[in-house]
Image (cartoon, coloured by chain):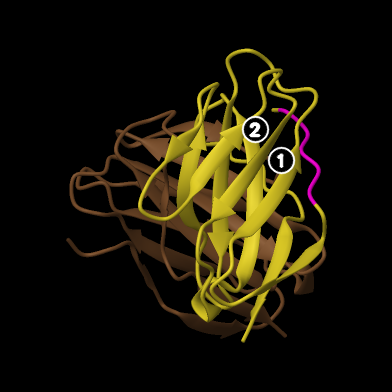
Chain colours: A brown, B yellow
Amino acid sequence: KAGVTQTPRYLIKTRGQQVTLSCSPISGHRSVSWYQQTPGQGLQFLFEYFSETQRNKGNFPGRFSGRQFSNSRSEMNVSTLELGDSALYLCASSLRQAYNEQFFGPGTRLTVL
Amino acid sequence: DAKTTQPPSMDCAEGRAANLPCNHSTISGNEYVYWYRQIHSQGPQYIIHGLKNNETNEMASLIITEDRKSSTLILPHATLRDTAVYYCIGNNAGNMLTFGGGTRLMVKP
């Protein structure tokens, strides 16, 4: 079975731009969660989607948003990028909602200049 | 979620058992203890989880004290590829994993 895939793997943007990251979960997994990892704050939960609906949300500003499609693939969007948004963005999938055995992708490394 | 405390770093000799401790004195009765690890430049990897009983799988063993205030992750024969940051998480909220600082395990030849 293929693992969680994330595209692109690396991205460079400038302040004020917006960015869209993509995540394809493991086949059959219906829950997708997103995390941000920075050296200063560590791994922080962004949001979780299940059946195309956001089920949980972390403490991030509204510039961070996401969606899930009917095939469980998910995208997250960050608008009006700030320098502090530079991070590794990780996507994780699991079989069902509220199930903590999660499978993480390799992440997208976003650099904001 | 239960607050967990782990030593920031540990060393282990290759081939020996690595015992990683975690304190979770505020864990509630329905919170599981999860362990993940993150090898450099990769996404976290699920290792094992448990509620009350000790658990074992192909990767590791999890020993939870009877009062559930602490646990130990055991890698029975550590290899260089086990060098990683290990996270202990107490959670029942579902998919809102709260990662702390973890323990940086260095396996040395």
Q: Is residue B105 left or right of residue A1?
A: right
- Residue B72 percent location from the top left of the image: 65, 43
Give the position of the N terminus of chain B as an image quadrant. top right
Residue at image x 36%, y 61%? A23
Left or right: A71 in relation to A46: left
Q: Amino acid at mark 2?
A: Gly
Residue at x 68%, y 23% (from the top left corner): B68
Residue A50 part of the magenta-drawn span: no
Which amino acid type is marked by label 1?
Asn
Q: Is residue B44 above or below residue B94?
A: below
Q: Are marks 1 and 2 in contact (CB under 8 Å)?
A: no
Q: Chain of mark 2?
A: B
Q: Which residues are magenta?
A: B2-6
In this image, A8 relative to B2: left or right?
A: left
Chain containing mark 1:
A
| Residue at mark 2 | B90
Which dot, 1 or 2, sits closer to the camera? 2
Quadrant of the drawing holding the C terminus of chain B: bottom right
Disc 2 crowd, CA 10 A, few/some/many (<14, 14-19, 20+): many
* Disc assigned to residue A59: 1
Viewer can see residue A78: no
Residue at the spot 33% in from the left edge and 61% down from the top edge: A4
